[in-house]
Image (cartoon, grey):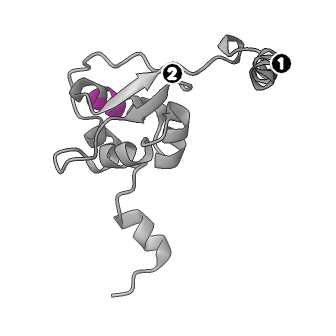
Amino acid sequence: MNVPRRERRKTEAGPSDPERLYVITGDPDGSERAALDLVTMIVSKAEPSPMVQPEQAVILRLCRAPLSVAELSAYLSLPFSVVTSLLTELLATGLIESRAPIVRATLPDRSLLEAVMHGLQKL
């Protein structure tokens, strides 16, 4: 049966439906969430298993290379609070690792690195 596009939106549950978001976030007792902000980098440490939620499996695949929580939220089209809830569960199981972003000021000065490189080449 061919359902018009407008009707399909009403009948299919999408990721932004409030009841779907409630199901995704899981634990209703309000357990403590991990201290994550928008720029925290997330890296997966394992491949998704059949036991994780579909959204968590997507996070594990996306985070083979480091991604920020904000990027994950945008890619998944989920609110930040829902993504942090999913990430908290993954952190608790050890499937992902969170890292603070690299602050540019902590990196060595480029001119210093170039001077060292030129000095080494002259040896």
From the viewer's perspective, tell me whether residue 18 is left or right of residue 6. left
In the image, the segment drawn in magenta is: 86-90
Q: Quadrant of residue 33?
A: top left
Amino acid, disc 2: Asp
Total numbered badges shown on the rendered structure:
2
At which x and y percent is residue 99?
46, 21
Residue drawn 76% across and 17% down?
Answer: 116
Find the distance from the CA under tag 1 to the CA under tag 2. 32 Å
From the viewer's perspective, tell me whether residue 75 is left or right of residue 20. right
Instruction: Name the residue beneath numbered marker 2.
Output: 37
Q: Is residue 103 above or below residue 72?
A: above
Q: Residue furthest front?
A: 123
What element does badge 2 sit on? loop
Task: Work out which quarter of the rendered image holds the C terminus and state it.
Answer: top right
Q: Is residue 98 above or below residue 23?
A: above
Which circle's residue, 1 or 2, is located before the other in the chain? 2
Q: Is residue 96 magenta?
A: no
What element does badge 1 sit on? helix
Amino acid, disc 1: Ser
Q: Quadrant of residue 43?
A: top left
Residue drawn 25% across and 46% down?
Answer: 53
Q: Nearer the viewer, mark 1 or mark 2?
A: 1
From the viewer's perspective, tell me whether residue 88 is left or right of residue 112. left
Residue drawn 41% across and 24% down?
Answer: 98
At which x and y percent is residue 81?
43, 29
Crowding at dot 2, Cα within 10 Å, few <14 / some 14-19 / many 20+, comes out as few
Instruction: Name the residue beneath numbered marker 1.
Output: 111
What secondary structure characterizes most of the magenta part? Answer: helix
